[in-house]
Amino acid sequence: MRSFTAAGVGAPPPWPGEGLTLIVPTLDSHHLLPRLVTSLQRQSWPHWRVLFIDGPSGSEHRAWLDALCHRDRRFAWQPQDPSLPGIFGAMNQGFRTAPPDHWLLFWGSDDWAAGATVLEDAIAATRPPDPGARPPDLVVCTGRYVDAAADGTAQPGRRTAFSGGRLYRLGLFLGSTPPHQATLIGPGARGRLDHYAEPFRLSGDLDYFLRLGATGGLRVRTLALELVHMSSAGASGQQTRRRLQEVRLAYRRAFGLLWWLPFGLRYVRRLWSRLEALPGSMRRARNRR
């Protein structure tokens, strides 16, 4: 196991205080990780770090992590603390471990960078807009789910984006949520709220963004940048009943008796994004005939 603090980037970041750590929970998922790793190693901006928080994986998976961290010191891993169970427990461990002045991205083993310059573009958006101004607390980009076709090719699916812009709290009330895989969480946001809450197992990210919005004065910058691709075969569509219960709980905590409005609008938006992705899928199906 390589210590995260020892995992350095060869040259100092090009902007004072600029740093980015990607937190990636893993569990026997080394067969998925090469795509994520390669997409990062190809980045035009090389000053990122990755911290894998590994659950009780087998020896083959941990040997793979050890070998990767030995080859490229920008990668590090540590075993997940048993007192912080589940995926959001692993993410909370990442909150605690990453340098306090770093921006954070939370990815899964089956996520990968959408292009070779996306981190350069995203990190540029973390800088203050004017000399002497304060940097944003969140930089919200977009992501896209990707399907695997029968012939092994990647087929783009629905897009995930936040439509609130600077009216962050209103955007949340209207059912829009920052996609956590495409949202850079800055030191300012971490200073306000630095953990995902219990009892959420599936929707802790929604609850986090809602609670963060309640702190007031949050500086949010949205970026029309497709930052990340996510496998549509991942865990996000599982345990639907529990997910719905958690989403309802998060909205009740945030908006009280009006919880049903953002709850309903959230799924209207989901349905609309799926419908928007259909024409391209239908064209690809016709072309394969």
Image (tube, grey):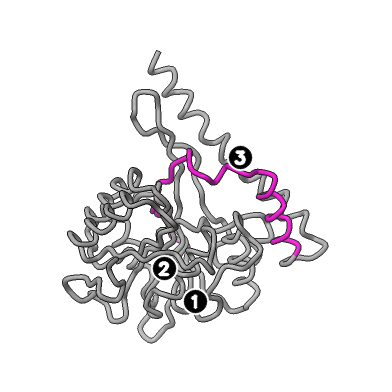
Q: What secondary structure is found at the residue carrying circle 1?
A: helix
Residue at position x 43%, y 65% from top? 184
Q: Which residue is mark 2?
A: 104
**Nearer the N terminus, badge 2 or badge 3?**
2
Residue 167 seen from this side: no
Is mark 1 in CB contact (under 8 Å) with mark 2?
Answer: yes
Which residues lie in the magenta part? 223-252
Which quadrant: the C terminus? Answer: top left
Q: Which residue is mark 3?
A: 272
**Where does residue 41 sit, x and y in percent of width and height?**
23, 55
- Residue reaching furthest front? 59
Determine which of the numbered discs, if any, sits on residue 190 in the image.
Answer: 1
Q: Nearer the viewer, residue 261 or 73?
A: 73
**Other-residue count near label 3 (Cα within 10 Å), few / some / many at <14 / 14–19 / ≥20:** few
**Where does residue 38 sit, x and y in percent of width and height?**
25, 49
Look at the image and say whether residue 238 sits in the magenta stretch: yes
